[in-house]
């Protein structure tokens, strides 16, 4: 039976793996939205892009690239690590919006991917949030684990 240290190491490895997957996914998606025209995105199968204002596509692409950096860098560098949780929360919101858009448009074939990404981002939020809450508490406040 694994001891507490081994369990913590496994949890950490799983968490960082999830964050890395999210970073790669959002970096790719953001780069594509910033480097391709809406018609090119539509030709790739992202048909919604032809009906959305280009400025919104650019905004989403920037948000995805920033999220890709934010899901890894603050926690890895230990500089404002709560930003990692904030980035994951933003990814959750972005995926909820994407699911709503795809359902409204009747685009169900790739909806599973949005659901998987939503679940993974939600898991990162759930795993990171308790540490963030503990770090925000002031001195003299008892924390029971």
Image (cartoon, rainbow, N blue to C red):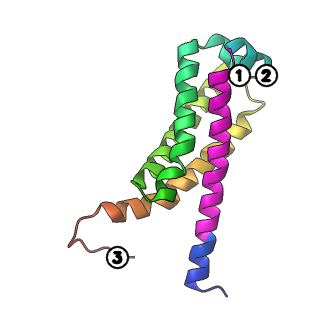
Residue sitting nearer the eye, 80 or 94: 80
User: Contact (CB < 8 A) between labels 1 and 2?
Assistant: no
Q: What element carries label 3?
A: loop
**Residues in magenta?**
11-37
Q: Which label number is shown at residue 26?
A: none
Q: Rounded to the nearest whole Å, what is the CA distance between mark 3 and mark 2?
A: 51 Å
- Mark 1 and mark 2 lie on one chain; the one further toward the N terminus is 2
Whole-percent x, y for residue 15 in the image: 60, 61
Q: What is the x, y in percent for residue 44?
A: 79, 22
N-terminal label among 3 and 2? 2
Rendered location of residue 109, percent (x, y): 78, 30
- Residue at x-position 20% and y-position 73%: 140
Residue count near mark 2 (Cα–Cα under 10 Å), binned few <14, some 14–19, many ≥20: few
Which secondary structure lies at badge 1?
loop
Residue 144 numbered mark, or none: 3
Picture quarter containing residue 9? bottom right
Q: Mark 1 points at which residue?
A: 106
Horizontal placement of 98 versus 145: left or right?
A: right
What is the total number of numbered labels drawn onto the structure image? 3
Nearer to me, 107 or 39: 39
Residue placed under numbered mark 2 in the picture: 44
Which x, y percent locates residue 123? 57, 55
Ranked by sequence position, the earlier of labels 3 and 1 is: 1
Q: Quadrant of residue 13?
A: bottom right
Q: Residue at x 53, y 48 (%)?
A: 71
Residue that protrudes farthest toward the front in the picture? 77
Q: Which of marks 3 and 2 is in front?
A: 2
Instruction: State the residue at coordinates (57%, 42%).
Output: 68
Q: Look at the image and tell me in which quarter the N terminus lies.
A: bottom right
Principal secondary structure, stretch drawn in magenta: helix
Magenta stretch: residue 90 in it? no
């Amino acid at each position: 039976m694994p001891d507490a240290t081994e369990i913590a190491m496994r949890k950490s490895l799983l968490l960082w793996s999830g964050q890395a997957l999210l970073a790669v996914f959002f970096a790719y998606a953001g780069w594509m939205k910033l480097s391709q025209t809406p018609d090119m995105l539509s030709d790739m199968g992202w048909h919604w892009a032809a009906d959305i204002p280009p400025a919104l596509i650019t905004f989403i692409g920037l948000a995805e690239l920033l999220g890709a950096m934010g899901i890894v860098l603050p926690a890895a560098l230990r500089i404002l690590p709560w930003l990692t949780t904030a980035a994951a929360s933003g990814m959750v919101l972005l995926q909820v919006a994407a699911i709503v858009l795809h359902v409204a448009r009747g685009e169900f074939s790739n909806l599973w991917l949005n659901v998987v990404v939503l679940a993974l981002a939600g898991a990162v939020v759930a795993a990171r949030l308790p540490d963030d809450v503990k770090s925000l508490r002031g001195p003299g406040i008892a924390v029971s684990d």
